[in-house]
Image: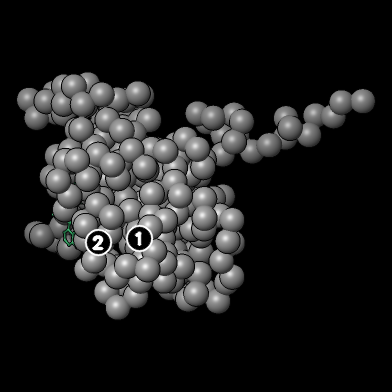
Amino acid sequence: MTTSVHAHRSPNPGNITAPPAVQALSVTKTYGRDATRVTALREVSVGFEAGRFTAIMGPSGSGKSTLMHCLAGLDTADSGRVLVGGTDITGLGDKQLTALRRDRIGFVFQAFNLVPTLTAEQNITLPLALASKATDTAWFDSVVATLGLKDRLSHRPHELSGGQQQRVAVARALLTRPDVVFGDEPTGNLDSTAGGEVLALLRRSSREMGQTIIMVTHDPVAASYADRVVLMSDGTLVGDIAGPTADSVLAALGKLGG
Ligand code: ADP
């Protein structure tokens, strides 16, 4: 006999098969007060589907970084809610947010943020070591192979190129199998060849490993590696492009500017 258990799932607009990996619900964030008050986010609602690679784009000051920081538990919204992997992070305290970021979120920043005295391998496994967790060797090998780092594991960051250093940072982010990896201009310090390699690897980790990735960028070429681009302007979402190309992103940005 069939049951109707699935019919009683909570409503899930936009995707009926699985809840978004990350979701903002009517998030508002202001900075400063009175004359210097700036509304960085105005009731932003957006969901990020699991296993997808999404780029957040928009003019400088449109609220991209603020949105990313609120989604990643690095900053708190004034109102609205943020859900990460089904957990409402809005009411979490500092300790819980630190644990959430350590255990469930991966970060790849513009500055690679590797520990200079540690080898590539030690940098990659550092988050697990800090959490006193054992490394899943098979997963480590798979991540390292995917990122082409097998021959570089005993190198220290200064012995690696910028592109290689960022690949180590990506491996470090993927190793904990986080609910989401956030990239903040991850190719901002790389030349176009090394940047393209890192972006292709991010895309590959979403396609082959099912990794959810959200990347803030101002570069239409970088955004074209994503499955989806959400466009921001003046603290609100103003566009959503599926299957973006550098040209379609540029055209959409051009309309915002004009
Ligand atoms: P973007 O990442 O798109 O460049 P931001 O999210 O950094 O935009 O900024 C959005 C708005 O919020 C801007 O007007 C910016 O000046 C303001 N803002 C961001 N961070 C702060 C802060 N810590 N204090 C005051 N204003 C801020």
Say whether residue 93 is visible.
Answer: no
Question: In the image shown, does 114 or 33 lie closer to the viewer?
Answer: 114
Mark 2 or mark 1, earlier in chain? 1
Q: Quadrant of residue 138?
A: bottom right
The x and y percentages for residue 51 are 49, 39
Q: CA distance from mark 2 to mark 1?
A: 8 Å
Q: Amino acid at mark 2?
A: Leu
Q: To which quarter of the image does residue 10 belong?
A: top right
The residue lying at 56 percent from left, 50 percent from top is 86
Do labels 2 and 1 touch, CB within 8 Å? yes
- Residue 194 spot, x, y in % from top left: 22, 45
Residue reaching furthest to the right: 1
Q: Secondary structure at mark 2?
A: loop
Residue indicated by mark 2:
160
Q: Nearer the viewer, residue 233 or 135?
A: 135
Q: Residue at x 25, y 39 (%)?
A: 196
Residue that appears at 54% across and 30% down: 15
Q: Position of residue 52 (x, y in %)?
A: 45, 36
Location of the C terminus (image quadrant): top left
Q: Which quadrant: the N terminus?
A: top right
Disc marking residue 242: none
- The verdict on label 2 being within 8 Å of ligand 1 is no
Q: Which amino acid type is shown beneath numbered disc 1? A: Arg
Front position in the image: 109 or 72: 109
Residue 33 located left or right of residue 85: left
Crowding at mark 2 (Cα within 10 Å: few <14, some 14-19, many 20+): some
Q: Residue at x 37, y 43 (%)?
A: 202
Instruction: Say which residue label 1 marks.
Output: 152
